[in-house]
Image (spheres, rainbow, N blue to C red):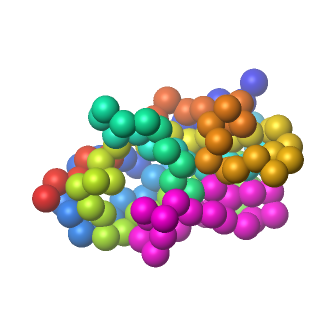
Amino acid sequence: QVQLVESGGGSVQAGGSLRLSCAASAYTFSYFYMGWFRQAPGKVREGVAVIDSDGDTKYADSVKGRATISQGYAKNTLYLQMNSLKPEDTAMYYCAATTHRPYGTSWYYEPLYNYWGQGTQVTVSS
């Protein structure tokens, strides 16, 4: 059983930056997608960004140009660099991964993911 542990959240003013990290407990972890989701109070959880096993990345339109998802050298660590943060980025950010082959399923389809972290809070003040 792989555990995902997020870190790096915090409070920041609008326009600031944060770097979120997610560490997988397994040193070698074969996944098809590993990515970030977020849930703001009173809203449904949404996909933010994902990286696939080939290193290709996808982003939600709301963060394109402001977010960069990347892996550590060992590929069992995931990062999300968020710049030019806005108050609407305030949310609990979750790391997720799937060992299920997507077969064309959209990367932001939550039931696809079989591993989830506990989340790290990001709060952006205006």
Residue 96 in sight here: yes
User: Where in the figure is residue 106, as x and y percent of width and height?
Assistant: 70, 50
Residue 77 in sight here: no
Residue 77 lies in the magenta stretch: no
Residue at 36 percent of width and 36 percent of height: 43
* Residue closest to the far left: 126
Residue at 80 percent of width and 57 percent of height: 53
Residue at 36 percent of width and 59 percent of height: 18
User: Where in the figure is residue 45, as x and y percent of width and height?
Assistant: 47, 38
User: Range of the magenta residues?
Assistant: 50-72
Residue at 72 percent of width and 36 percent of height: 112
Q: Is residue 79 left or right of residue 119?
A: right
User: Where in the figure is residue 121, as x and y percent of width and height?
Assistant: 35, 40
Closer to the camera, 32 or 9?
A: 32
Closer to the camera, 24 or 86?
A: 86
Quadrant location of the C terminus? bottom left
Quadrant location of the N terminus? top right
Closer to the camera, 108 or 15?
A: 108
Q: Is residue 16 left or right of residue 46?
A: left
Q: Is residue 56 left or right of residue 20?
A: right
